[in-house]
Image (cartoon, grey):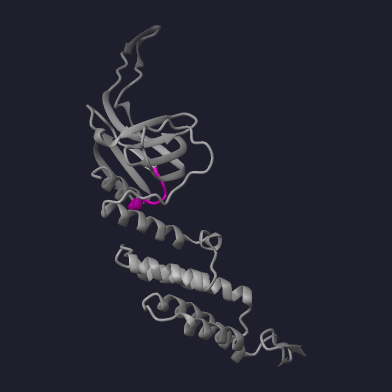
Amino acid sequence: MSDCKYCGQPAGFLHSKHADCERRYADAKVQIVEAISEAVLSSASLQPVEQRVNELAQISFVSDAERHGLLLEGWGRAVDRCLEDDVLDESEEKRLIELRDHFALSQADLQTTEAYSRVVKAAVIRDILRGNLPTRMTIDGNVPINFQKGEQVVWAFPNTDYLEDRTRRQYVGGSQGVSVRVMKGVYYRVGAFKGEAVDRNVRIHVDSGLFVITDKNIYFVGPVKSLRIAYAKVLTFQSFSDGIGIVRDSANAKPQIFITGDGWFTYNLVMNLAHF
């Protein structure tokens, strides 16, 4: 007879857990996450929330390591609540910081979650919309870009794919020609022709590298291709789910595509900085 893995008491023949213990454990995990995520909607003291979380963990067999993971998940859910309208106001950001500090969630832990990046990005967009140039991004190490005097880096996307649209021409309906026998030893050759020329656009991968957005320009630096695009030289920005397209203000310009992984943020960032 084995013991229950939750309470440590005998679980019965060929059983490793009590059904009630497992149910209590599962319910507690859900309640802990909900307690943290709902706390962001109030400005009340977080002490009762902490007491509730500790009580649930203690009576429901939730270990300290699991509790910490659930706190991170709850903080992420709180971020979801704040960004339901795609806007993070200052009171929401302040409350998220209070939750982080009260439950001793380190920045290193939060940076492992997608939620942390979403908070920073939303705050950056808010700053720009209010006429403030964000200073939330720093780039570690040497950057091989000759920035202009007074230019401020706003955001950088590593490992960005750079794509270009190219025109390829092919001929449709052509023939290489055939030989037709007229009599023994005599052949008549029907001439070859290329057919109709058809142009088609193809999107090709040019390079991968660092994509940097500043208050004055857009940069891409890779082992094969490097470029700088001033906002004044952009005709249109195109929004994609995972990046943006840029069409320069020049004759026969084709889209230059940058796959950053977050099309919504990248598009809103460059659109607003272009009019900053």
Magenta part of the chain: 259-265
Q: Is residue 237 left or right of residue 22?
A: left
Magenta span contains residue 31 = no
Q: Quick check: 7 above or below 144?
A: below
The residue shown at (52%, 36%) is 142
Q: Quick check: 199 above or below 181?
A: below
Q: Quadrant of the N terminus?
A: bottom right
The residue shown at (27%, 46%) is 271
Observer-nearest residue: 1 or 70?
70
Q: Find the residue positioned furthest to the right.
A: 1
Q: Is residue 259 visible?
A: yes
Residue 94, percent from left and from top: 39, 67
Residue 87, percent from left and from top: 30, 63
The residue shown at (46%, 61%) is 116
Residue 110, percent from left and from top: 51, 63
Residue 184, percent from left and from top: 39, 8
Observer-nearest residue: 224 or 113?
113
